[in-house]
Image: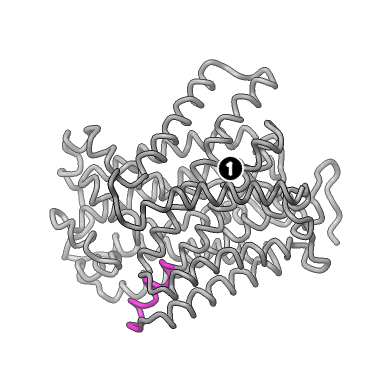
Amino acid sequence: MTPEPAGRPTYGLRPDILSQWETLAQSLSSIAPTAAPAMIIPLVIAAAGRSAWVSFVVATIAMALVAAHVNVFARDSATPGSLYAFVRGEFGSGIALPAGWALLVAYIGTAAAVTGGIIQYAQNLVGVTGTGIAILIIALSIGLSAMLAYRNVELSTRFMLWIECASVATVVLLFVVPTTAHPLSWDPAQMSPAVFTITPVGAGLVLATFAFVGFESATALGAEAKDPLTTIPRAVMGTAVISGAFFVFATYAEVDAVGSKIDLLTGTQAPLQVLATLKGRAWVGPIVSVGAIMSFFACAMSCITAAARTMFLMGRQQVLPPSLGRVHARYQTPHVAVMASSIAAVIPALILAARGVSAFDLYGWLATIATYGFLAAYVFVTIAAPMHAMRRRTLTAWKAALAIITVGFLGWAFVASLPPAGSTGPERALAPIFILSILIGCIISKGSH
């Protein structure tokens, strides 16, 4: 067993093993940067047109504000409980319970959702489809993620770091590789005054915000990161800023490549392969597809890691079954919580796949539910941050105003993401499913206490 650092509880987890880069990898992997150009950016372009890159600029600023409120706590305390622990420390268990369950739904839902991305790009890559193949891909993806998270968090975060570096590099390669067909260039149409108007920017803003959710997951490594009061805040803010810069670049490049033929992106479920063909570099398509698959896999592993540590702390505090708070004697990982999180992630994905739901819908439905969870957790921690500052007598009018603006933005994003009135598709059930999940979770927690 690794000795526990003086003055910092690690709950039996292995302390001081994750570097700044490995901590950053946890947050980067949770948002799966390659998932944005592969699945989300085309939807933002469909909504905002040439203003899509501006939507991502605004979303980056908004997420940086959320990161600043998360770091109010991350600079002062380090635990494995992520945002749940911050809210509990400020408001107590009564308010922390829905925040904790919102976070669990978010992480577990994202781990389940990205299996849809893996299915989509794997099937397009090898040309083999079918329900059986989809089920096999889901089982292998979550199973391998669980195995790595179970045995060694240091190994899994290093693996995630290299995966994300490679997958982002493949996307950048796609846009910057020399070509005579649709080369990356200055696009005056994306800089015209009409691009900066409120209506189109607002139309793409909600979807652009969804691309960032999970950026705070490094806060779940408080017991295992080296110098966590420094490395974790850097990872949280760095992820928001680095990802935002990448999203803005990728959005600009995608619009520049298709010009006025936006339907080429919005009419396909594999836009990166379409872009590779459009640029006359079809050989890049399979490389980008492999990069997207690996990024989605890293996201699943990252979210299982974060969910397990949140669940682990809730088990230690006996708001969930105490067995979830156990640590593996050899690996010093929350092995029971890892297995519980993995099972919770694989079940909804398998059910949807077995019912013949397309990979794109599987991703969209589960990711939407997960996003509701992230937005709710961000609201809780943003409200808690000025309360924390007020107790420490460091609250200023400017900090309070930023908190109000941030909460207002998050609330608007939640409402704007709801399906239109009169909608008859499955999407109308997603918000009620999220709310019901939180209620059931809180009831379970009350029963465990």
Task: Please give left or right for residue 220 compared with residue 130 in the image.
Answer: right
Could you tell whether 346 is left or right of 6 in the image? left
Q: Is mark 1 on a helix, strand or loop?
A: helix
Q: Which residue is drawn at 40% across and 59% down?
A: 35
Residue 313 visible to the viewer: no
**Observer able to see residue 240:** yes
Q: How many labels does the image show?
A: 1
Looking at the image, which is closer to me, 29 or 86? 86
Q: In which quarter of the image is the N terminus?
A: bottom right
Q: Which residue lies furthest to the left in this view?
A: 260
Amino acid residing under circle 1: Arg
Q: Where is residue 358 shown, x and y percent of the image?
A: 35, 70
Q: What residue is at 68 percent from the left and 47 percent from the top?
A: 81
- Residue marked by disc 1: 234
From which residue to which does the magenta span run? 116-128
Q: At x 53% / y 15%, what residue is drawn? A: 397
Instruction: Reply yes or no: does residue 129 show up in magenta.
Output: no
From the viewer's side, name the closer residue of 324 and 255.
Answer: 324
